[in-house]
């Protein structure tokens, strides 16, 4: 009789990740375990089948071989089933699920014995100029550092902690609850696997002390708001000499009074007077590297965008250079004297006297559209 597909046995897809495999195995093994189905031969066989599928698919090398060759990968004396036995005791049941529950709920004894120090996050605000060109910043952060008196061991004079006699150094103990065996942290050593008989007077057995430290942070050119810089092992020191965590510097670029940044491009508004917009000319516009000249063609309308290549931000990832986009704003003149008002009035009369409003095509299109709109309403 041909063997069933391992993926079908666990009810998972071929693209399932380890977490999905463990979850499916836990659910099925709970249902068919012999302790819950005593005397049921079908459940016992089903359980063996489930465990066989799990131990192949959870192993990267075995899974790869199975995906390529199927069950033939384990023939010729390598059949998986000969490595299994019937599980009938509650202690065996706890051993089966110890790894699965540990990975899913973070209760694995190996993870608790040596706990890495906490990661830290530092919020830093910099100017747009600093973000574009890069800068070195000095920061001071509160943190835990390894105790210099006990060298992080937590024991006085740097002596080694003693192995816990209750859990025999495992950091975990097993308690029987019905047909379950529950794994929990050892109450004697709090999951550390060791006990400090003579704690350090400086850190009181923690192996670390609270302090401050100064760091120089190199901000690369092109960094932007919400980017993060990671500094390995610059976080809090772990307890009893464990590896320190990391420091994350969260960046915020402050708002600029001239430029607005969108990805690697910079935008700015450039006001020009009515005469410049109508007749054209040349003006100077600001960039982060100084001023450049921009030619304004005649009949330029408000809102027109002019692109200046290569005057934006250099990407922090691929080093490509963005552009500067200047948005023209035609400014209405204010504080006019008598002569200026007279000249503008004469110009207005001249523009209004020309047939078909050829000097103001946009206005003509707008009012023609308004007229058609109301004509349609009265039909």
Image (tube, rainbow, N blue to C red):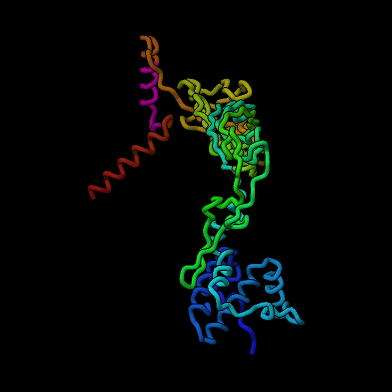
- How many numbered tags mark residues here? 0
Rendered location of residue 71, percent (x, y): 69, 80
233 horizontally vs 176: left or right: right
- Tell me, yes or no, whether the highlighted magenta stretch contains residue 97: no
- Residue lying at the far right of the rendered structure: 76
Q: Is residue 153 above or below residue 68?
A: above
Q: Nearer the viewer, residue 375 or 206?
A: 206
Q: Is residue 351 above or below residue 372?
A: above
Rendered location of residue 5, percent (x, y): 61, 79
Rendered location of residue 296, percent (x, y): 55, 26
Rendered location of residue 297, percent (x, y): 55, 27
Q: Nearer the viewer, residue 208 or 369?
A: 208
Quadrant for the N terminus, please. bottom right
- Tell me, yes or no, whether the highlighted magenta stretch contains residue 347: yes
Q: Quadrant of residue 7?
A: bottom right
- Residue lying at the far bottom of the rendered structure: 1
Q: Quadrant of residue 207?
A: top right
**Looking at the image, which residue is at 67% across and 44% down?**
160
Q: Nearer the viewer, residue 2 or 350?
A: 2
**Looking at the image, which residue is at 68% across and 41% down?**
159
Q: Is residue 318 above or below residue 7?
A: above
Q: Main secondary structure of the magenta part?
A: helix
Q: Which residues are the magenta region? A: 344-357
**Looking at the image, which residue is at 58% across and 67% down?**
16
Task: Tell me if residue 310 can be seen.
Answer: no
261 horizontally vs 338: left or right: right
């Amino acid at each position: 009789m041909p063997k069933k597909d391992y993926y079908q046995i666990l009810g998972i897809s071929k693209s399932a990740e380890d977490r999905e495999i463990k979850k499916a195995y836990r659910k099925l093994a709970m249902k068919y375990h012999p302790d819950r189905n005593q005397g049921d031969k079908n459940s016992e066989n089903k359980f063996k089948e489930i465990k066989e599928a799990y131990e192949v698919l959870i192993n990267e090398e075995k899974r790869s071989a199975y995906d390529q060759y199927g069950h033939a990968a384990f023939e010729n004396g390598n059949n998986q089933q000969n490595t299994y036995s019937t599980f009938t005791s509650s202690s065996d049941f706890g051993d089966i699920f110890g790894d699965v529950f540990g990975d899913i709920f973070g209760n694995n004894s190996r993870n608790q014995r040596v706990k890495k120090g906490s990661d830290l996050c530092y919020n830093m605000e910099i100017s747009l100029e600093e973000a574009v060109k890069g800068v070195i910043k000095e920061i001071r952060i509160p943190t835990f550092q390894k105790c210099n008196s006990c060298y992080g061991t937590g024991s006085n004079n740097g002596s080694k902690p003693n192995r816990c006699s209750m859990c025999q150094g495992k950091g975990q103990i097993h308690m029987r609850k019905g047909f379950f065996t529950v794994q929990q942290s050892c109450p004697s050593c709090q999951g550390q696997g060791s006990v400090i008989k003579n704690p350090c007077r400086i850190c009181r057995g923690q192996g670390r002390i609270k302090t401050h430290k100064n760091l120089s942070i190199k901000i690369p050119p092109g960094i932007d708001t919400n980017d993060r810089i990671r500094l390995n092992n610059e976080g809090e020191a772990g307890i009893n000499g464990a590896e320190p965590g990391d420091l994350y510097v969260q960046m915020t670029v402050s708002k600029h009074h001239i430029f607005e940044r969108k990805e690697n491009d910079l935008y700015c508004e450039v006001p020009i007077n009515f005469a410049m917009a109508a007749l054209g000319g040349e003006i100077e516009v600001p960039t982060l590297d100084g001023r450049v000249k921009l030619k304004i063609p005649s009949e330029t309308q408000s809102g027109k965008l002019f692109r200046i290549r290569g005057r934006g931000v250099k990407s922090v990832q691929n080093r490509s250079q963005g552009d500067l986009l200047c948005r023209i704003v035609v400014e209405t003149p204010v504080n006019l004297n008598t002569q200026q008002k007279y000249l503008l009035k004469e110009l207005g009369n001249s523009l209004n006297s020309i047939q078909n409003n050829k000097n103001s095509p946009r206005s003509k299109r707008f009012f023609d559209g308004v007229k058609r709109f109301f004509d349609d309403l009265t039909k």
